[in-house]
């Protein structure tokens, strides 16, 4: 604000000093400063406060890797903690008030555990409702205004608060009818927002609190009267006969019929909620010794989970940490169809799966959502066995024939943007520039049109021009006449960037400058090194790809798409995957839907074995399989079934780094780490220890020294300091003024005295030499001892 005021004052004074008429305000205000500040804050997420301290974590980029990732990010709850504050365990643990409102599973592991949460599936954030009907009801039902209350009567009344404001008091004999009236008003309110009204009695403080404001987290519960739910056969028949269409209309209908009620945290503390329908039957039965009056009942216990956790089959049979990995990590990294208007978008980067499928084994919650597009994966035939040794640890073996048929095939998109930044910069072919020529110019003419943009469908690779741009530089020659020089400033693809041109967009901004966007697409087939994951938090890297003839097969001729190692289960304890695989096998055979809903008494191991028996399979999912190489039956029975797999965004194409030569860092003279500049992979301590254990000392020296930052220096043996090379190419010590002397070698039988060099040449890493010089700049002397070998 101060910057704008100062700029505006200076421009007005300059304008008025010239006796000119005042113009519009945009002539005196530099709006770019404000616009630039907002853009930087939104892009970086750092906002400057009044205390000139940067506040981070206010703005986050919306990630669109798949529908679940987008929806979960929109329902995310973040607890802001300053970087200097250390958070204890109490702030991370879930509390009783979060039951049904915050997902107990979907939270990151590590430093942000418990600080970043996600709303439960039925959690609702209240919207602001009008107070007028509530105030009119209170005034017409005996509420004494605050102006009429004296100190003598204050101890004999109940205080009434509406959205935190003290409006009046009511007598102790009148507060119960008022509470019943307010709750009756919530059943049939004049506006839809009052369905979210909350009425709470705080008896120790003699207070009645009514809330209609926004920001409260509510959750729906079934209404119970005399231990019987209002949801009965008559209400269901009436609902079906009326045929409500839109989802919000259906939900409003249940609120109008008082079948469902929205409760807040404070009001829920005074309610007695039945977890199952069996609890109501038990309360009404003769075996109940004392009368229990329930006020509400849970719709289903699994509704305490969030969206990403509610789609996990059999989550109650997995280790909790595995459910966390799937709910917060793998489900949001899975590749699916993240938008339906992909052809009309130009996202910076994006990926989508060619043939997404619906889970064979899914929960009732997924069936109620009726959103099959939220799934990001495919159903694969998975066998659990040790085969050929290529699926050790977390590695998996995949069927090349299935991949050739399109299994887990994805499309990768990337958009490159370029704009004219000045009047001297224009789009065009780089071959028109004065500094162009050679094979690169010929290649650019083949792939670019006259406007400098590539042809649709053109295949581009490394160093190809994706947006041609030329800058005109004015310079003066010897005849003092201006001449223009054209310089190529085109945007080129860097290392590992490739694709086919999908779309080209050319527009103009408000200032008339052109903006170009080029969208590339690249089809990616799974290969060795790509990452996959099951719905139970177990990831796997492709260790080998075999053709269908080399893989084992069953009596029915079924070849598994994926083979995983059985040693992955004892420590991870993901029994839910084995249940999913067995149940998916029965579903695929019978062609009917069976559910894997958590906390469901019907989802038992016995029911799964019975379904397998009815389908003609072994009850435990084991089958005799035959070796693909020999055709002989394998000794052990193999567990095989259908499992839902996800392809994650971690791919070899995005991570592979290799080099034989290339750029080096100008400071350390070591290979650069930037992958786009053909950088190398850092040779760490663990790799060093492996080579030492194998006794490969020469290979270790080659990797870390000769092929890295090899350097030669001269050291004075007298003062043990580095010498410098003079113009005469003779090394000289600056400290003791010694020069390199030639060695006179004498025979053992001669009496000639052999002279030893005072300045010797040694080989050290350049980073070591840089460290010595930096220590010397701090006043720390480092001496180097040498020995003649």
Image: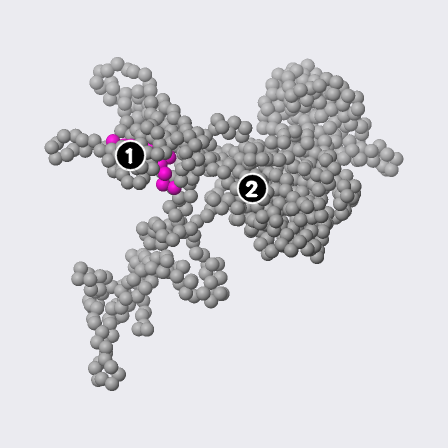
Please indicate, yes or no, whether residue 553 appears anywhere in the rendered image.
yes
Q: CA distance from mark 2 to mark 1?
A: 41 Å
At 65% from the left edge and 23% from the top edge, which residue is drawn? 247
Q: Give the vertical position of 768 relative to 654 (above or below).
A: below
The spot of residue 371 in percent (x, y) is: 63, 30
Mark whose residue sits in front, 2 or 1? 2
Q: Main secondary structure of the magenta part?
A: strand
Q: Which residue is mark 2?
A: 404
How packed mark 2 is, by other alpha carbons closer than 10 Å (few <14, some 14-19, many 20 or more), is few
Please identify the residue farthest to the right as the structure is shown. 286
The spot of residue 409 in percent (x, y) is: 54, 39
In terms of image quadrants, where is residue 701?
bottom left
Front residue of 404 and 222: 404
At 56% from the left edge and 51% from the top edge, which residue is drawn? 544
Front residue of 408 and 361: 408
Drawn side of residue 677 relative to residue 687, left or right:
left
The spot of residue 466 in percent (x, y) is: 37, 35
At 36% from the left edge and 41% from the top edge, which residue is drawn? 463
Please indicate, yes or no, whether residue 767 appears anywhere in the rendered image.
no
The spot of residue 516 in percent (x, y) is: 38, 29
**Colour setting:** one colour
Q: Quadrant of the N terminus?
A: top left
Check disc 2 and report its element: helix, strand or loop.
helix
Drawn side of residue 570 relative to residue 487, left or right:
right
Q: Which residues are magenta?
A: 462-472
How packed mark 1 is, by other alpha carbons closer than 10 Å (few <14, some 14-19, many 20 or more), is many
Front residue of 638 and 171: 638
Q: Which residue is mark 1?
A: 431
At 61% from the left edge and 51% from the top edge, which residue is drawn? 550
Query: How many dots with numbers?
Result: 2
């Amino acid at each position: 604000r101060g910057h704008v005021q100062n700029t505006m004052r200076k421009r007005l004074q300059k304008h008025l000093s010239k006796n000119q008429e005042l113009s519009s305000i945009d002539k005196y205000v530099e709006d770019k400063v404000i616009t630039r500040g907002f853009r930087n804050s939104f892009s970086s997420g750092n906002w400057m406060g009044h205390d000139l301290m940067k506040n981070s974590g206010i703005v986050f980029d919306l990630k669109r890797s798949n529908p679940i990732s987008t929806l979960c990010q929109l329902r995310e709850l973040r607890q802001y903690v300053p970087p200097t504050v250390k958070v204890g365990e109490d702030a991370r643990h879930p509390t009783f008030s979060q039951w049904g409102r915050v997902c107990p599973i979907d939270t990151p592991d590590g430093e942000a555990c418990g600080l970043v949460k996600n709303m439960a599936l039925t959690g609702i954030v209240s919207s602001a409702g009008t107070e007028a009907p509530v105030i009119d009801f209170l005034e017409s039902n005996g509420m004494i205004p605050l102006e009429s209350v004296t100190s003598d009567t204050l101890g004999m009344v109940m205080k009434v608060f509406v959205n935190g404001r003290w409006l009046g008091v009511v007598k102790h004999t009148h507060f119960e009818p008022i509470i019943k009236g307010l709750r009756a008003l919530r059943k049939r309110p004049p506006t839809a927002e009052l369905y979210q009204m909350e009425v709470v009695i705080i008896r120790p403080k003699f207070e009645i609190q009514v809330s209609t404001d926004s920001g409260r987290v509510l959750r729906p519960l079934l209404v119970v009267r005399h231990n019987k739910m209002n949801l009965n056969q008559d209400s269901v028949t009436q609902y079906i006969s009326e045929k409500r269409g839109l989802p919000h209309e259906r939900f409003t209908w249940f609120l109008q019929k008082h079948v469902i009620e929205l409760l807040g945290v404070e009001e829920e503390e005074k309610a007695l909620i039945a977890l199952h329908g069996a609890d109501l039957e038990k309360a009404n039965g003769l075996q109940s010794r004392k009368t229990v009056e329930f006020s509400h009942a849970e719709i289903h216990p699994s509704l305490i989970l969030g969206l990403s956790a509610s789609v996990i089959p059999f989550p109650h049979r997995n280790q909790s940490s595995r459910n966390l990995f799937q709910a917060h990590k793998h489900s949001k990294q899975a590749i699916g169809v993240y938008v339906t208007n992909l052809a009309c978008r130009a996202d910076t980067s994006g990926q989508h799966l060619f043939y997404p499928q619906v889970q064979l084994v899914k929960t009732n919650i997924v069936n109620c959502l009726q959103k099959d597009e939220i799934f990001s994966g495919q159903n694969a035939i998975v066998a659990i066995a040790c085969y050929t040794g290529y699926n050790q640890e977390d590695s998996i073996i995949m069927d090349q024939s299935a991949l050739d048929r399109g299994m887990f095939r994805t499309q990768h998109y990337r958009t490159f943007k370029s704009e004219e930044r000045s009047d001297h910069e224009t789009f065009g072919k780089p071959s028109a520039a004065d500094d162009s020529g050679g094979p690169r110019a010929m290649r650019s003419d083949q792939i670019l049109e006259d406007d400098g943009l590539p042809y649709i469908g053109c295949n581009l690779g490394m160093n190809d021009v994706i947006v041609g741009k030329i800058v005109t530089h004015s310079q003066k020659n010897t005849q003092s006449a201006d001449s223009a020089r054209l310089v190529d400033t085109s945007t080129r693809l860097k290392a590992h960037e490739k694709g086919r041109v999908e779309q080209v967009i050319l527009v103009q901004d408000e200032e008339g400058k052109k903006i170009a966007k080029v969208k590339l697409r690249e089809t990616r087939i799974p290969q060795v090194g790509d990452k996959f994951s099951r719905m139970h938090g177990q990831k796997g890297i492709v260790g080998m790809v075999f053709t269908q003839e080399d893989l084992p097969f069953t009596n029915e001729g079924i070849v598994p798409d994926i083979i995983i190692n059985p040693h992955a289960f004892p420590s991870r304890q993901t029994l839910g995957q084995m249940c999913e695989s067995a149940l998916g096998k029965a579903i695929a055979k019978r062609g009917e839907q069976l559910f894997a809903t958590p906390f469901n008494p019907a989802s038992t191991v016995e029911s799964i074995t019975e379904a397998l028996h009815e389908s003609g399979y072994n009850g435990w999912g084991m089958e005799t399989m035959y070796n693909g190489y020999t055709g002989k039956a394998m000794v052990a029975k193999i567990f095989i079934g259908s499992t839902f797999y996800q392809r994650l965004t971690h791919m070899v194409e995005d991570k592979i780094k290799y080099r034989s030569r290339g750029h080096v860092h100008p400071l350390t003279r070591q290979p650069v780490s930037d992958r786009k500049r053909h950088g190398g992979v850092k040779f760490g301590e663990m790799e060093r220890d492996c080579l030492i254990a194998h006794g490969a000392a020469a290979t270790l020296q080659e990797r870390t020294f000769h092929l890295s930052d090899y350097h030669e220096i001269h050291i004075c043996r007298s003062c043990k300091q580095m010498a410098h090379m003079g113009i005469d190419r003779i090394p000289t010590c600056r400290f003791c003024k010694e020069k390199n002397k030639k060695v006179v070698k004498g025979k053992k039988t001669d009496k000639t005295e052999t002279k030893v060099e005072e300045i010797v040449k040694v080989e050290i890493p350049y980073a070591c030499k840089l460290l010595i010089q930096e220590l010397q700049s701090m006043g720390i002397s480092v001496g180097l001892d040498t020995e003649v070998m």
